C-alpha cells in the first residue's frame, strides 16, 4: 500500500473517531438530550390524555366522551409543543383524525414499530436523525381498557354511529390488544436543540 493511501486511511479513521461520521453529523450529547426530553414529553402527553379520557368516560360516558377526545389530544400536543419548542403530535396508519397521517419520510420508522410495538413489557420507541431534524417515535399499543371501547372490534352501535358522524374518514377501529394503534411523534431541528435544555417534569 502506498504512503499516500495509508495517510488517507488514517485521516478517515481519525475523523470518524471524533464523531464526524455519526448519523447526520450530530453530536451524541445533542441526541441524548433530545431523547431525554422526548421521553418526558411523551410520558406527559400520555398521562394527561389518559386523565382527560378517564374523567370523561366516568362522568359523561363513551358517546359524549368522543368530543372530549377530539379536542383534548390536539390541545395537549399544542401546549406541549409551545412549552418545549419541539413539535409534539401523534400519527397513525389507521388514523381517526386525517391530520394524523404518517409523513412519507417516517413510513419506514413507523413500519418498524408495527413489527414490534412492545419491548421488555413497555411501549417501544425509536429515535433517528431525519434530514436536519431529530425524530422520536413511541408506540401506542392497543390496550384492552379503555381503548377497546372506541377502537376495538366490538364497539357499541350507538357509539359507532357517533364516531362515524364525528370522523367520516375514521379508520381507527378493529384493533386487537397489543396491536400498534399509533405513535407519539416528537420532532426538533438539531441546530435548535442546545437552546432547549429545560426539564418538563
Image (spheres, rainbow, N blue to C red):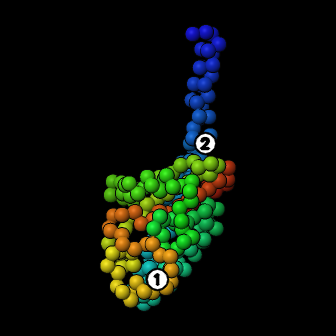
Q: Is residue 149 visible?
A: yes
Quarter occupied by residue 50: bottom left
Badge 1 marks a residue whose secondary structure is helix
Q: Name the residue located 61 percent from the left edge and 62 percent from the top edge.
A: 87
Identify the mark at residue 32; answer none if there is no mark: none
What is the spatial separation of the Cα atoms under label 2 and label 1, in whole angstroms? Answer: 43 Å
Q: Name the residue located 45 percent from the left edge and 67 percent from the top edge.
A: 94
Residue 176 pos. (x, y %): 32, 68
Mark 1 Cα within 10 Å, few/some/many (few <14, many 20+)? few
Residue 37 pos. (x, y %): 54, 57
Furthest residue in direction front, as rendered: 169
* Nearer to the camera, 71 or 197: 71
Quarter occupied by residue 120: bottom left
**Quarter of the image where the N terminus is located:** top right
- Whether tag 2 and tag 1 are in contact, CB under 8 A, the answer is no
In the image, is residue 93 above or below residue 51? Answer: above
Q: Name the residue located 33 percent from the left edge and 58 percent from the top edge.
A: 121
- Which label lies toward us, 2 or 1? 1
7 on left or right of 59: right
* Nearer to the camera, 147 or 169: 169
Identify the mark at residue 164; answer none if there is no mark: 1
Residue 12 pos. (x, y %): 60, 25
Badge 2 marks a residue whose secondary structure is helix
**Which label's residue is closer to the chain start, 2 or 1?**
2
Furthest residue in direction top, as rendered: 2
Identify the mark at residue 24; answer none if there is no mark: 2
Mark 2 Cα within 10 Å, few/some/many (few <14, many 20+)? some
171 on left or right of 143: right
In the image, is residue 44 above or below residue 27? Answer: below
Amino acid at each position: 500500500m502506498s504512503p499516500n493511501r495509508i495517510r488517507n486511511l488514517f485521516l478517515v479513521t481519525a475523523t470518524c473517531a471524533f464523531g464526524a461520521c455519526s448519523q447526520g453529523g450530530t453530536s451524541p450529547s445533542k441526541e441524548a438530550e433530545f431523547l431525554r426530553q422526548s421521553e418526558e414529553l411523551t410520558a406527559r402527553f400520555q398521562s394527561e390524555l389518559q386523565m382527560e379520557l378517564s374523567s370523561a368516560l366516568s362522568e359523561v360516558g363513551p358517546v359524549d366522551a368522543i368530543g372530549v377526545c377530539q379536542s383534548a389530544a390536539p390541545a395537549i400536543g399544542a401546549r406541549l409543543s409551545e412549552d418545549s419548542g419541539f413539535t409534539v403530535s401523534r400519527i397513525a396508519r389507521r388514523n381517526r383524525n386525517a391530520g394524523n397521517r404518517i409523513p412519507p419520510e417516517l413510513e419506514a420508522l413507523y413500519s418498524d414499530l408495527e413489527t414490534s410495538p412492545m419491548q421488555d413489557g413497555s411501549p417501544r420507541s425509536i429515535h433517528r436523525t431525519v434530514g436536519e431534524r431529530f425524530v422520536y417515535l413511541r408506540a401506542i399499543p392497543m390496550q384492552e381498557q379503555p381503548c377497546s371501547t372506541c377502537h376495538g372490534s366490538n364497539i357499541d352501535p350507538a357509539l359507532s354511529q357517533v364516531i362515524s358522524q364525528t370522523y367520516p374518514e375514521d379508520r381507527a377501529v378493529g384493533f386487537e390488544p397489543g396491536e400498534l394503534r399509533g405513535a407519539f411523534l416528537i420532532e426538533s431541528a438539531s441546530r435548535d436543540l442546545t437552546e432547549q435544555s429545560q426539564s418538563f417534569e
